[in-house]
Image (tube, rainbow, N blue to C red):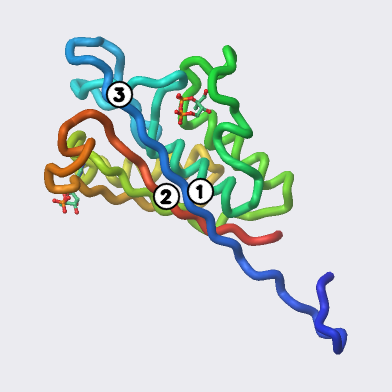
Amino acid sequence: MTTTPEGHPVTPLPRTGIGVDVHAWAPEGDDRPLWLGCLRWPGERGIEGHSDGDVAAHAACNALLSAAGLGDLGSVFGTDRPEMAGASGAQMLAHVADLLARGGFQIGNVAVQVVARRPRVGARRAEMEAAMSSALGGAPVSVSAATTDGLGFVGRVEGLAGIATALVAPR
Ligand SMILES: Nc1ccn([C@@H]2O[C@H](COP(=O)(O)O)[C@@H](O)[C@H]2O)c(=O)n1
Ligand SMILES: C[C@@]1(CO)OP(=O)(O)OP(=O)(O)OC[C@H]1O
């Protein structure tokens, strides 16, 4: 146990983390599905990626790893490992949750923002939050979205982004 010089116990502080992920949209007419926030989005354009390209799940993984000081997506999952081809965001979140638990951390919460013109996240917000939370073993996840008002690579519909923060605490 950590103590002050006088010998009083010090409660370890919670730790915050930050994460981002960006993927390009698949070419128009490509039939790959869109996965976002651990949900499949029928009728929406798909995403380029080595895994399923779920920017919300990837940003959340990055934020959790950052909070725990356990690296990032590349250091944990690599960038082109054959076994990661098509890997789902839910699988990755579950693995990250397991790494944190083994490292002695509990997850306080994760907040994710999707930056995209489509899909409209609001309509499935509760479903996304439940799916991501379930993948993490029950930790609270909140989801929001913004469009960038037509500016930048999101506005030009070149790609979409996920941004996340996480709070973790020693068990
Ligand atoms: N993919 C998205 C983007 C936005 N929303 C919702 O629309 C609101 C307004 O977005 P602005 O970027 O114009 O401020 C935003 O606060 C979200 O509620 C969405 O659901 N899905
Ligand atoms: C998820 C991984 C797995 O190879 O690949 P991608 O789907 O390309 O996703 P990205 O966020 O670009 O990189 C992280 C990789 O770990």
Disc 2 to disc 1: CB gap under 8 Å? yes
Is residue 6 shown left or right of residue 151?
Answer: right
Question: Mark 2 sits on what residue?
Answer: 164
> Residue 133's mark?
none
**Dot 3 amino acid type:** Leu
Answer with the quarter of the image where residue 170 lies.
bottom right
SS class, disc 3: loop
For discs 2 and 3, the disc positioned in front in the rendered view? 2
Residue at the (65%, 39%) spot, across then down: 98
Decide if residue 140 is in sight here: no
**Dot 1 amino acid type:** Ala
Precedes in sequence: disc 1 or disc 3: 3
Question: Mark 3 sits on what residue?
Answer: 34
| Image x and y of residue 168, in percent | 59, 58
44 lies above or below 76:
above
- Image quadrant containing the N terminus: bottom right
Residue at the (18%, 31%) spot, across then down: 157
| Image x and y of residue 145, in percent | 25, 48
Disc 2 to disc 3: CB gap under 8 Å? no
Residue at the (63%, 61%) spot, across then down: 169
**Dot 2 amino acid type:** Ala
- Image quadrant containing the C terminus: bottom right
